[in-house]
Image (spheres, helix red, strand yellow):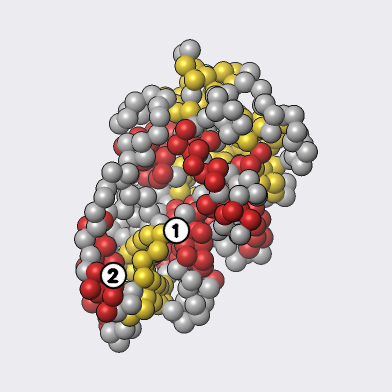
Amino acid sequence: MKTQAAVLWEINKPWSVEEIDLDPPGPGEVLVKLGASGMCHSDEHLVTGDLPFELPIIGGHEGAGVVQEVGEGVSWLSPGDHVVFGFIPSCGRCASCSTGHQNLCDLGALLGTGRQIADGTSRHHAKGKDLGTMCLLGTFAKHTVVNEASCIKIEKDVPLTRACLLGCGVVTGWGSAVYAADVQPGDTVAVVGIGGIGANAIQGAKLAGAKKVIAIDPVEFKREKAMEFGATHTFSSMTEALDGIRELTWGTMANKVIMTMGVGSGAVMAEALALTAKRGRVTVTNIHPAMEMSASMSLLDVTLMEKQIVGSLFGSGNPRYDIPKLLGLYREGQLDLDGLVSKEYPLEGINDGYDDMRNGKNIRGVLVF
């Protein structure tokens, strides 16, 4: 069939919205008509080359839609089912999946290939070339074919324009606070970078019972939004926050510091640790450039103050469990998905949406098909 998609042909070039050819689903695969796709900063890393995936590639990894057709062997999904894509597939059988760490499924090793899990080939084509798909999904498209391991079935009453956000940003941010940082009632939590992930780290910290939630971002609009999501204090930089947190905590500093900047930098790790209390934890969620191999920090500080640094992928969560759970919190009014969406765009407006993101105008933009 023919459909439309946003394709990246070269690094540091705009997304090209064009007609593509899409093959039918093979064994274990599903054809999905997308209803909406979140515009995550991680797709910007494709444009800048910080994520060195093979080009050309269809972007997008936060998607929700309706199943149109299933391939041979797919028994638990049917046409008409509503699904959210988990940006990391989960097989349910590897050591990570079977011990409750679906975010580290062995299939994640294939993310950078952009090809189908089953046979390593492509279902997406344009201009006589095979196209890769971001995180094996390619949600910047009106239709896509994905492996069933990437699908999570959801209730049909949830708007797809909100459900799509659960594919990455919401679970990643919420889980960075609740799971990876292990925020406890009464904790002081600092969140550095208030985009789609940081906003949800604030929501997670609040739901976990944090006493103080401190949002750090240079953009005033994002600091204002942070207060709506549950932040109690805001600062424009980690330098400014240092004295502020010291005063707020009587010198004990933040129990948890969650790094959710658009692009991480090893040069600021010392600042993050300076915000952190004795036996406190720094959770690194933001993507760093693939070739960055150094970080500036005092390892003596780590040792003498027993500080911890942990990484978090997909919020250290389990997509098949956490996506339905968080949608339940949304239904009950305990998780704000509506406030995350600053603006909706048509597929043809994708470059405008990313311009808005770069200029600090969006918490999360959403493509609506």
Question: Farthest residue in the bottom direction?
Answer: 250
Quarter that holds the N terminus:
top right
Q: Mark 2 points at which residue?
A: 273
SS class, disc 2: helix
- Residue at 47 percent across and 65 percent down: it is 180
Q: In this view, does 263 lie above or below 175?
A: above
* Residue 224 visible in the shown view: no
Left or right: 168, with 286 as reference point? right
- Residue at 40 percent across and 64 percent down: it is 310
Identify residue type, mark 2: Leu
Q: Position of residue 72 (x, y in %)?
A: 74, 29
Q: Dividing the picture into quarters, in which one does residue 88 lie?
A: top right
Q: What is the total number of numbered labels drawn onto the structure image? A: 2
Left or right: 215, with 22 as reference point? left
Q: Which of 108 and 357 is in front in this view?
A: 108
Q: Dividing the picture into quarters, in which one does residue 253 lie?
A: bottom left
Q: Dividing the picture into quarters, in which one does residue 116 lie?
A: top right
- Residue at 57 percent across and 62 percent down: it is 335
Neighbour class for label 1 at 10 Å: few (<14), some, many (≥20)?
many
Asked if marks 2 and 1 touch (Cβ < 8 Å), the reply is no
Q: Position of residue 164 (x, y in %)?
A: 57, 45
Q: Where is residue 104 in the image (x, y as percent from the top left)?
A: 52, 52
Question: Farthest residue in the front direction?
Answer: 95
Q: Mark 1 points at which residue?
A: 312
- Residue at 32 percent across and 41 percent down: it is 50
* Residue 97 visible in the shown view: yes
SS class, disc 1: loop
